[in-house]
Image (cartoon, rainbow, N blue to C red):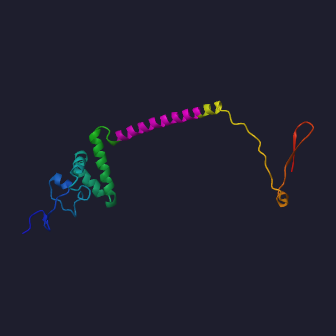
Amino acid sequence: MRQKGHRHGRTVSPCAGCKLLRRKCVKDSCVFAPYFPAKEPYKFAIVHKIFGASNVNKMLQELSENHRSDAVDSMVYEANARIQDPVYGCVGTISSLHRQLETLQTQLAFAQAELIHIRTLHRIHTKPPPYTASTVTFPSNKDFYSDIDMAVAYTDDAGDFLWSC
């Protein structure tokens, strides 16, 4: 004779939702079973405390199965945020992070402005190295000269340069 709650020699435990609600869990038709396993009872407990089991059940049944896991994760996150901050919940967390972001952006802008200022001061106080003319030696190959247009600079009587190609 089989004992109640045993299947093939092992004990079948209800999901966390059914266990907390003290009802029989039929794994095939229980909407909570895939998302609130018996090993994680705190997840359902906190969601139940904030949203209520009936509301969670309605929300999950209205969603398609491929969106339910994300919805449960969101509900658990929101429930945890509501426990920590009963007034603002996750909106308080988002606002706090937004303020931190604005502060960091302001600090970054000041740091970038200071860096530009330091670079400008460094350029003013540092003289560039003197430029020197280098001597270019051309090969003595006749074919090389025949393919190159040479530019020659001449000066007129006024000292202005005149270019010839």
Residue at (15%, 56%) from the top-left corner?
Answer: 23
Secondary structure mainly formed by the magenta segment: helix
In percent of width and height, residue 94 lies at 38, 41
Question: In this rendering, would 5 be left or right of 73?
Answer: left
In percent of width and height, residue 97 lies at 39, 39
**102 drawn magenta:** yes
Instruction: Indicate whether 82 appears above or below 38.
Output: above
Question: In this rendering, would 62 be left or right of 19?
Answer: right
As drawn, which residue projects farthest toward the right? 157
As drawn, which residue projects farthest toward the left? 1
Q: Please name whichever residue, 100 or 110, is drawn nearer the observer in this view of the structure.
A: 110
Residue at (31%, 60%) from the top-left corner?
Answer: 65
Q: Please name whichever residue, 6 or 44, is drawn nearer the observer in this view of the structure.
A: 6
Q: Quarter of the image holding residue 118?
A: top right
**161 drawn magenta:** no
Question: In this rendering, would 134 be left or right of 13?
Answer: right
In the rendered structure, which segment of residues is drawn in magenta?
91-118
Instruction: Indicate whether 121 appears above or below 8.
Output: above
Figure quadrant of the N terminus: bottom left
Instruction: Indicate whether 61 appears above or below 91.
Output: below
In percent of width and height, residue 40 lies at 23, 52
Q: Please name whichever residue, 165 or 104, is drawn nearer the observer in this view of the structure.
A: 165
Residue at (31%, 41%) from the top-left corner?
Answer: 89
Q: Quarter of the image holding residue 130?
A: top right
Question: In this rendering, would 7 be left or right of 86?
Answer: left
In percent of width and height, residue 117 lies at 58, 32
